[in-house]
Amino acid sequence: RYHGRGMSRSEFEETVVAYLEDHDLGSELTAVQEGRVFRGGPIYAGPLHNLFMIDRYATGLYPDRFEDERLFDRQRLADIINGDA
């Protein structure tokens, strides 16, 4: 649906954010309640991409909180992907 062109901030708010605000569980997210939802990458990128993007943004936005901390175990993820878990 959104391939081939970027989505403007207003389009993002009118579609993705509005959906979250009206969703039973999505509306309970702190970011949604506080108006702090932002697009971190392609909307249909998938869970692996999202893990790395969340890690990147968290460590970038809150370097003191995540100074020497990984948000997920990269070796465990690799083991799962390779069928070694």
Image: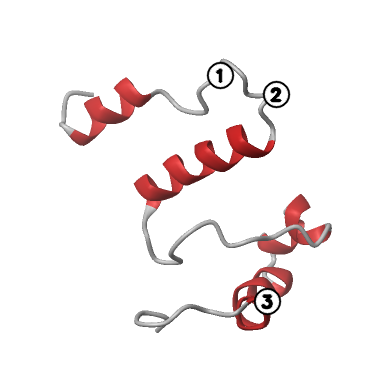
**Mark 1 residue element:** loop
**Mark 3 residue element:** helix
Please give left or right for residue 49 compared with residue 56 in the image.
left
Please give left or right for residue 44 compared with residue 16 in the image.
left
Residue 68, quarter of picture: top right
Mark earlier in primary sequence (3, 2): 3
- Spot occupied by residue 11 in the image (x, y as percentages of width and height): 61, 83
Residues tagged 1 and 2 counted as in contact (Cβ below 8 A) = yes
- Spot occupied by residue 34 in the image (x, y as percentages of width and height): 83, 57
Q: Amino acid at mark 3?
A: Glu
For the N terminus, which image quadrant?
bottom left
Q: Amino acid at mark 2?
A: Arg
Q: Amino acid at mark 1?
A: Glu
Label placed on residue 65: 2
Query: Dot 1 corresponds to which residue?
Result: 69
Please give left or right for residue 18 compared with residue 79 in the image.
right
- For the residues labelled 3 and 1, the Cα–Cα distance comes to 31 Å
- Spot occupied by residue 3 in the image (x, y as percentages of width and height): 36, 79
Residues tagged 3 and 1 counted as in contact (Cβ below 8 A) = no
Residues tagged 3 and 2 counted as in contact (Cβ below 8 A) = no
Mark earlier in primary sequence (3, 1): 3
- Spot occupied by residue 52 in the image (x, y as percentages of width and height): 43, 40
